[in-house]
Protein backbone atom coordinates (compact mmCIF):
# COMPACT_ATOMS: atom_id res chain seq x y z
CA UNK A 1 0.00 0.00 0.00
CA UNK A 2 1.32 3.44 -0.96
CA UNK A 3 1.92 5.83 1.90
CA UNK A 4 0.52 9.24 1.01
CA UNK A 5 2.06 12.49 2.15
CA UNK A 6 -1.39 14.10 2.12
CA UNK A 7 -3.10 14.79 5.44
CA UNK A 8 -5.89 12.38 6.35
CA UNK A 9 -8.97 13.80 8.10
CA UNK A 10 -12.18 11.98 9.18
CA UNK A 11 -15.20 12.90 7.07
CA UNK A 12 -16.91 14.26 10.18
CA UNK A 13 -14.23 16.98 10.46
CA UNK A 14 -14.46 18.18 6.85
CA UNK A 15 -16.97 21.00 6.42
CA UNK A 16 -16.78 21.08 2.62
CA UNK A 17 -14.62 19.48 -0.05
CA UNK A 18 -11.05 18.12 0.39
CA UNK A 19 -9.61 20.19 -2.49
CA UNK A 20 -12.17 22.67 -3.78
CA UNK A 21 -13.70 23.98 -7.00
CA UNK A 22 -11.91 26.83 -8.78
CA UNK A 23 -13.43 30.21 -9.51
CA UNK A 24 -13.20 30.86 -13.23
CA UNK A 25 -11.69 34.35 -12.94
CA UNK A 26 -9.08 33.90 -10.21
CA UNK A 27 -8.50 30.15 -9.81
CA UNK A 28 -9.34 30.48 -6.11
CA UNK A 29 -10.50 27.16 -4.66
CA UNK A 30 -13.88 27.16 -2.92
CA UNK A 31 -14.63 24.13 -0.75
CA UNK A 32 -18.35 24.71 -0.17
CA UNK A 33 -20.87 22.01 -1.06
CA UNK A 34 -24.54 21.73 -0.15
CA UNK A 35 -27.52 19.65 -1.25
CA UNK A 36 -31.23 20.08 -1.85
CA UNK A 37 -33.59 17.83 0.15
CA UNK A 38 -33.95 14.37 -1.41
CA UNK A 39 -37.65 13.75 -1.82
CA UNK A 40 -40.05 11.92 -4.10
CA UNK A 41 -39.44 14.17 -7.12
CA UNK A 42 -35.69 13.55 -6.95
CA UNK A 43 -36.29 9.82 -6.56
CA UNK A 44 -38.41 9.78 -9.73
CA UNK A 45 -35.87 11.86 -11.67
CA UNK A 46 -32.99 9.49 -10.87
CA UNK A 47 -35.12 6.44 -11.72
CA UNK A 48 -36.05 8.00 -15.07
CA UNK A 49 -32.39 8.64 -15.95
CA UNK A 50 -31.56 5.00 -15.32
CA UNK A 51 -34.63 3.86 -17.28
CA UNK A 52 -33.91 6.13 -20.26
CA UNK A 53 -30.24 5.19 -20.49
CA UNK A 54 -29.63 3.23 -23.69
CA UNK A 55 -26.88 1.27 -21.99
CA UNK A 56 -26.32 0.38 -18.34
CA UNK A 57 -24.61 3.25 -16.57
CA UNK A 58 -21.29 2.52 -14.89
CA UNK A 59 -20.99 3.14 -11.15
CA UNK A 60 -19.20 6.45 -11.69
CA UNK A 61 -21.74 7.61 -14.30
CA UNK A 62 -24.51 6.86 -11.80
CA UNK A 63 -22.69 8.95 -9.20
CA UNK A 64 -22.52 11.82 -11.70
CA UNK A 65 -26.25 11.62 -12.44
CA UNK A 66 -27.21 11.47 -8.76
CA UNK A 67 -25.01 14.40 -7.73
CA UNK A 68 -26.00 16.80 -10.52
CA UNK A 69 -29.61 16.41 -9.38
CA UNK A 70 -29.01 16.73 -5.65
CA UNK A 71 -26.22 19.30 -5.37
CA UNK A 72 -27.37 22.81 -4.50
CA UNK A 73 -24.03 24.64 -4.35
CA UNK A 74 -20.75 23.33 -5.77
CA UNK A 75 -17.81 25.49 -4.82
CA UNK A 76 -18.57 28.96 -6.24
CA UNK A 77 -21.41 27.66 -8.45
CA UNK A 78 -25.14 27.45 -7.77
CA UNK A 79 -26.26 24.31 -9.58
CA UNK A 80 -29.90 25.25 -9.18
CA UNK A 81 -29.36 28.09 -11.65
CA UNK A 82 -27.88 25.75 -14.30
CA UNK A 83 -29.40 23.21 -16.66
CA UNK A 84 -28.37 19.55 -16.34
CA UNK A 85 -25.76 19.52 -19.15
CA UNK A 86 -23.94 22.49 -17.61
CA UNK A 87 -24.02 20.89 -14.16
CA UNK A 88 -22.55 17.71 -15.61
CA UNK A 89 -19.74 19.62 -17.32
CA UNK A 90 -18.89 21.39 -14.05
CA UNK A 91 -18.87 18.15 -12.07
CA UNK A 92 -16.84 16.16 -14.60
CA UNK A 93 -14.23 18.93 -14.65
CA UNK A 94 -13.94 18.79 -10.84
CA UNK A 95 -11.36 16.84 -8.89
CA UNK A 96 -11.97 13.12 -8.44
CA UNK A 97 -11.63 13.28 -4.65
CA UNK A 98 -14.12 16.13 -4.31
CA UNK A 99 -16.82 14.19 -6.18
CA UNK A 100 -16.32 11.02 -4.10
CA UNK A 101 -16.43 13.10 -0.90
CA UNK A 102 -19.65 14.80 -1.98
CA UNK A 103 -21.19 11.38 -2.68
CA UNK A 104 -20.35 10.22 0.86
CA UNK A 105 -21.63 13.48 2.38
CA UNK A 106 -24.89 13.16 0.45
CA UNK A 107 -25.41 9.65 1.85
CA UNK A 108 -24.90 10.93 5.41
CA UNK A 109 -27.28 13.84 4.87
CA UNK A 110 -29.99 11.89 3.05
CA UNK A 111 -29.98 8.56 4.91
CA UNK A 112 -27.71 8.84 7.93
CA UNK A 113 -24.13 7.95 8.69
CA UNK A 114 -24.50 4.20 9.34
CA UNK A 115 -24.00 1.94 6.34
CA UNK A 116 -24.12 -1.86 6.10
CA UNK A 117 -21.83 -3.66 3.65
CA UNK A 118 -22.05 -7.36 2.77
CA UNK A 119 -18.62 -8.91 3.36
CA UNK A 120 -16.98 -12.28 2.71
CA UNK A 121 -13.93 -13.17 4.81
CA UNK A 122 -10.94 -14.05 2.57
CA UNK A 123 -9.64 -16.38 5.31
CA UNK A 124 -12.59 -18.54 6.37
CA UNK A 125 -15.07 -17.55 3.61
CA UNK A 126 -17.75 -16.66 6.16
CA UNK A 127 -20.26 -14.09 4.92
CA UNK A 128 -21.41 -11.38 7.28
CA UNK A 129 -22.84 -7.88 7.46
CA UNK A 130 -20.35 -5.17 8.35
CA UNK A 131 -21.65 -1.88 9.74
CA UNK A 132 -19.57 1.24 9.08
CA UNK A 133 -19.94 4.84 10.21
CA UNK A 134 -19.28 7.04 7.20
CA UNK A 135 -18.26 9.89 9.49
CA UNK A 136 -15.13 7.86 10.30
CA UNK A 137 -14.16 7.63 6.62
CA UNK A 138 -10.57 8.79 6.12
CA UNK A 139 -10.38 11.60 3.58
CA UNK A 140 -7.07 12.80 2.13
CA UNK A 141 -7.05 16.58 1.73
CA UNK A 142 -4.95 19.11 -0.18
CA UNK A 143 -4.60 22.51 1.45
CA UNK A 144 -4.33 24.94 -1.45
CA UNK A 145 -5.68 28.40 -2.00
CA UNK A 146 -5.61 28.33 -5.80
CA UNK A 147 -5.88 25.59 -8.38
CA UNK A 148 -2.25 25.96 -9.52
CA UNK A 149 -1.12 25.25 -5.94
CA UNK A 150 -2.50 21.70 -6.28
CA UNK A 151 0.36 20.76 -8.60
CA UNK A 152 3.25 18.89 -6.98
CA UNK A 153 6.70 18.61 -8.52
CA UNK A 154 8.37 15.23 -8.04
CA UNK A 155 12.09 14.84 -8.67
CA UNK A 156 12.80 11.38 -10.01
CA UNK A 157 16.13 9.57 -9.88
CA UNK A 158 17.24 7.92 -12.01
CA UNK A 159 15.57 10.09 -14.67
CA UNK A 160 12.33 8.87 -16.19
CA UNK A 161 12.36 8.33 -19.95
CA UNK A 162 9.34 9.84 -21.69
CA UNK A 163 9.19 10.02 -25.46
CA UNK A 164 12.91 9.31 -25.64
CA UNK A 165 13.74 12.21 -23.30
CA UNK A 166 15.34 11.83 -19.86
CA UNK A 167 13.12 13.69 -17.37
CA UNK A 168 14.46 14.50 -13.91
CA UNK A 169 11.17 15.84 -12.59
CA UNK A 170 7.48 15.62 -13.42
CA UNK A 171 4.52 17.74 -12.34
CA UNK A 172 1.42 15.93 -11.07
CA UNK A 173 -2.00 17.22 -10.04
CA UNK A 174 -5.03 15.39 -8.60
CA UNK A 175 -7.01 13.48 -11.18
CA UNK A 176 -10.26 14.94 -12.50
CA UNK A 177 -13.63 13.19 -12.24
CA UNK A 178 -13.78 13.12 -16.06
CA UNK A 179 -11.40 10.15 -16.01
CA UNK A 180 -13.61 8.11 -13.69
CA UNK A 181 -16.80 9.09 -15.51
CA UNK A 182 -15.46 7.91 -18.89
CA UNK A 183 -13.98 4.62 -17.72
CA UNK A 184 -15.65 1.46 -19.03
CA UNK A 185 -16.92 -1.08 -16.52
CA UNK A 186 -14.99 -1.66 -13.32
CA UNK A 187 -11.55 -0.46 -14.43
CA UNK A 188 -11.35 2.32 -11.82
CA UNK A 189 -8.17 1.94 -9.76
CA UNK A 190 -7.08 -1.15 -11.66
CA UNK A 191 -3.77 -1.83 -13.36
CA UNK A 192 -5.49 -2.01 -16.74
CA UNK A 193 -3.55 0.02 -19.34
CA UNK A 194 -6.73 1.86 -20.35
CA UNK A 195 -7.18 3.28 -16.85
CA UNK A 196 -3.49 4.08 -16.48
CA UNK A 197 -3.38 5.84 -19.85
CA UNK A 198 -6.34 8.06 -18.95
CA UNK A 199 -4.94 8.77 -15.48
CA UNK A 200 -1.48 9.68 -16.82
CA UNK A 201 -2.95 11.91 -19.53
CA UNK A 202 -5.08 13.80 -17.00
CA UNK A 203 -2.89 13.98 -13.88
CA UNK A 204 0.70 14.17 -15.20
CA UNK A 205 0.84 17.65 -16.69
CA UNK A 206 4.53 18.45 -17.16
CA UNK A 207 8.14 17.26 -17.28
CA UNK A 208 11.37 19.24 -17.43
CA UNK A 209 12.66 17.82 -20.72
CA UNK A 210 9.42 18.18 -22.71
CA UNK A 211 7.71 21.40 -23.77
CA UNK A 212 3.98 20.77 -24.11
CA UNK A 213 2.81 24.36 -24.75
CA UNK A 214 -0.25 23.63 -22.62
CA UNK A 215 -1.17 20.44 -24.46
CA UNK A 216 -1.45 16.91 -23.01
CA UNK A 217 1.97 15.53 -22.04
CA UNK A 218 1.14 11.87 -22.55
CA UNK A 219 -0.01 11.76 -26.13
CA UNK A 220 -0.25 8.21 -27.49
CA UNK A 221 3.26 8.26 -28.96
CA UNK A 222 4.82 9.09 -25.58
CA UNK A 223 2.74 6.50 -23.73
CA UNK A 224 4.10 3.83 -26.06
CA UNK A 225 7.70 4.72 -25.14
CA UNK A 226 7.28 4.15 -21.39
CA UNK A 227 9.31 1.41 -19.74
CA UNK A 228 7.69 -0.89 -17.19
CA UNK A 229 9.58 0.65 -14.28
CA UNK A 230 8.44 4.13 -15.27
CA UNK A 231 4.82 3.00 -15.69
CA UNK A 232 4.91 1.82 -12.07
CA UNK A 233 6.68 4.97 -10.85
CA UNK A 234 4.10 7.16 -12.56
CA UNK A 235 1.26 5.10 -11.09
CA UNK A 236 2.72 5.60 -7.63
CA UNK A 237 2.93 9.37 -8.05
CA UNK A 238 -0.60 9.65 -9.44
CA UNK A 239 -1.88 7.64 -6.47
CA UNK A 240 0.15 9.82 -4.11
CA UNK A 241 -1.86 12.81 -5.33
CA UNK A 242 -5.21 11.03 -5.04
CA UNK A 243 -7.02 13.24 -2.56
CA UNK A 244 -10.47 12.17 -1.37
CA UNK A 245 -11.91 9.25 0.58
CA UNK A 246 -9.99 6.06 1.30
CA UNK A 247 -12.57 3.68 -0.15
CA UNK A 248 -11.12 0.65 1.67
CA UNK A 249 -12.00 -0.03 5.29
CA UNK A 250 -10.52 -2.14 8.09
CA UNK A 251 -12.65 -5.22 8.68
CA UNK A 252 -12.50 -7.98 11.34
CA UNK A 253 -14.24 -11.26 10.62
CA UNK A 254 -16.62 -12.07 13.52
CA UNK A 255 -16.07 -15.82 13.03
CA UNK A 256 -12.31 -16.33 12.67
CA UNK A 257 -11.19 -12.84 13.86
CA UNK A 258 -9.09 -12.37 10.72
CA UNK A 259 -8.39 -8.68 10.07
CA UNK A 260 -8.16 -7.34 6.53
CA UNK A 261 -8.94 -4.33 4.34
CA UNK A 262 -11.87 -4.46 1.97
CA UNK A 263 -13.84 -2.25 -0.40
CA UNK A 264 -17.53 -1.86 0.31
CA UNK A 265 -20.26 -1.61 -2.30
CA UNK A 266 -20.48 2.05 -3.37
CA UNK A 267 -22.87 1.42 -6.25
CA UNK A 268 -26.04 3.51 -6.17
CA UNK A 269 -28.44 0.58 -5.69
CA UNK A 270 -26.73 -0.43 -2.47
CA UNK A 271 -25.22 2.83 -1.19
CA UNK A 272 -28.62 4.53 -1.27
CA UNK A 273 -30.76 1.40 -1.04
CA UNK A 274 -32.66 -0.24 1.81
CA UNK A 275 -30.04 -3.01 2.07
CA UNK A 276 -27.51 -0.43 3.26
CA UNK A 277 -29.53 0.51 6.35
CA UNK A 278 -28.94 -1.08 9.77
CA UNK A 279 -31.76 -3.34 10.93
CA UNK A 280 -32.74 -0.87 13.66
CA UNK A 281 -33.75 1.64 10.94
Image (tube, helix red, strand yellow):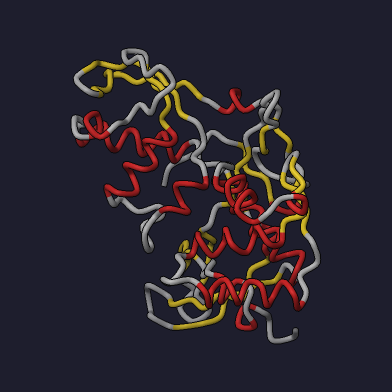
The part of the image, by quadrant, that contains residue 186 is bottom left
Spot occupied by residue 239 in the image (x, y as percentages of width and height): 44, 41
- The structure residue drawn at horizontal position 59% and vertical position 52%, both measured from the top left corner, is 88
Residue sitting farthest toward the bottom: 279
Q: Horizontal placement of 209 versus 253: left or right? A: left
x%, y% of residue 12? 75, 54
Residue at the farthest right position: 37
Please state if 63 lies on the left or on the right of 183 as rendered: right
**Count of marks, rendered view:** 0
Could you tell me residue 23's position as x and y percent? Answer: 70, 31
Front one among 162 and 121:
162
Q: Residue at x 35, y 14 (%)?
A: 211
In terms of image quadrants, where is residue 17?
top right
For the residue pair 13 and 90, the one nearer the viewer reads as 90
Q: Is residue 112 above or below residue 207?
A: below
Q: Percent from the top left, x then y, of residue 249? A: 54, 61
Choose between 228 and 194: the one closer to the eye. 194
Which image quarter is the C terminus in?
A: bottom right
Residue located at (32% from left, 33% from top):
233
Amino acid sequence: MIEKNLESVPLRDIEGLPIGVAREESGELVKQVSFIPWGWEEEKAIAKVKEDSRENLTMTQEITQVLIRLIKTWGPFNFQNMDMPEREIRLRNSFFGDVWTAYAKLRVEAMGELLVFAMACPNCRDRFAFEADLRDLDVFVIEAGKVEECVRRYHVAPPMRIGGEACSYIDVRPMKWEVAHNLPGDLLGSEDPRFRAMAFQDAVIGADAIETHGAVLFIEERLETLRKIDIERLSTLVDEMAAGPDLATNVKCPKCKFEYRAFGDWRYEHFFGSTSLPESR
